[in-house]
Amino acid sequence: MQRRESGLELNLSKEKLIEMYRKMVEIRSFEEKVFELYAQNLVPGTIHLYAGEEAVAVGVCSNLRKDDYITSTHRGHGHCIAKGAQLNRIMAEILGKKTGYCEGKGGSMHIADFNIGMLGATAVVGAGIPIAMGAGLSIKLRGTDNVVACFFGDGASNQGTFHEAINMAAVWKLPVIFVCENNVYAMGTCQSRVMLIENIADRAVAYGIPGIVVDGNDVLAVYEAAQEAVERARKGEGPALIECKTYRHKGHSRIDPAKYRPKEEVEEWLHKDPMKRFKEKLLQTNVLLEDEIQQVEKEVSTEIEEAVKFAMESPYPSPKEALEDVYAPM
Ligand SMILES: Cc1ncc(C[n+]2csc(CCOP(=O)(O)OP(=O)(O)O)c2C)c(N)n1
Ligand SMILES: [Mg+2]
């Protein structure tokens, strides 16, 4: 198991850094808006917010091409945005509208867009892991140099699917980057209550693949770890397991007040907010100036307002469409 630290020595272009910052702002602002809309009773079902974990999705997806793939989880809005999904269509899906990615029939936890390689979010914990493995096998059989990034939580890493799929991907050297978003909790269950190991990346040893622990609140550290894993996978050298240590700012889902988390722990993690840290780094190193940062934030704010307007003005699907799109067309 390796441990990664980071700096700005990655030599990323200014454009790339701005793009990464913009994506993080998009995710955070999007989640704040969804939180507000939920409070107004406009969101059917529940929501699991990604705020606090932005550096993971952005650090990983910034290494991917449009024709690469990802699989996601119940906490998936951030993965979609980082992979290039349109904010208005994600928002419409969350609000159950016909213009959403799944025509309003999937909702928050089932967003997919094959055009950008987003193979789907799933409410079943750990279910995306074998799907990513299958997509990796498809890539190998087709002989292309694409890769799959597979996002899942610390809780999911205790499911059988994790072990079976990683073992198979390792044996067949499939181009999959397994990204564990270790946010310390699976619903109200702290990792230390259900695992005797500190680092989930240690499990990589059992499958003979690289296991990397990274500060999941440092977007550049995540970027660097993912870059190496993506390069290996594209060359046919097989999968890697990257564990990103992070924290969700809100409760598990919208109805969870998260009283099981000690106040000091929450404060400590809020202090390590990935957005704040990246912004400070960009300012301190003069990569971006304060007015450029503000410009990005202003543009994103307009984009979010437009997404809400689009979603609110869109129609609901009609009841007779309920059984359409259940099976893929032949
Ligand atoms: C197979 C399965 N078991 C249990 C649940 C209920 N459930 C939903 S989310 C969750 C916790 C998942 O924790 P983790 O994988 O760490 O992801 P996080 O919510 O922290 O992002 C559980 C147990 C489920 N949806 N699917
Ligand atoms: Mg978790």
Image: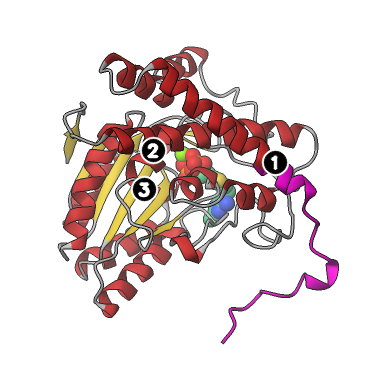
Read off the residue under disc 1: 308
Q: Which of the two discs, 3 and 1, labels the residue nearer the N terminus? A: 3
State which quarter of the image contains the C terminus.
Answer: bottom right
In contact (CB < 8 Å): disc 3 and disc 1? no
- Residue type, numbered disc 3: Cys
- Taking depth in this image into account, of 194 and 153 the one nearest to the observer is 153
Position of 176 with respect to 254 (left or right) is: left
Q: Which of the two discs, 3 and 2, labels the residue nearer the N terminus? A: 2
User: Which of the labelled discs sits on residue 19, or is there none?
Assistant: 2
Question: Relative to residue 14, is residue 144 depicted above or below?
Answer: below
Say whether residue 180 is magenta.
no
- Taking depth in this image into account, of 160 and 244 the one nearest to the observer is 244
Dot 1 alpha-carbon crowd within 10 angstroms: few under 14, some 14 to 19, many 20 or more: many
User: Which of the labelled discs sits on residue 61, or is there none?
Assistant: 3
Dot 3 alpha-carbon crowd within 10 angstroms: few under 14, some 14 to 19, many 20 or more: many
Dot 2 alpha-carbon crowd within 10 angstroms: few under 14, some 14 to 19, many 20 or more: some
Whole-percent x, y for residue 271 in the image: 42, 15
Residue 171: quadrant of the picture: bottom left
User: Which residues fall within the magenta stretch?
Assistant: 307-330
Q: Residue at x 17, y 66 (%)?
A: 236
Residue 41: quadrant of the picture: top right
Whole-percent x, y for residue 214 in the image: 26, 35
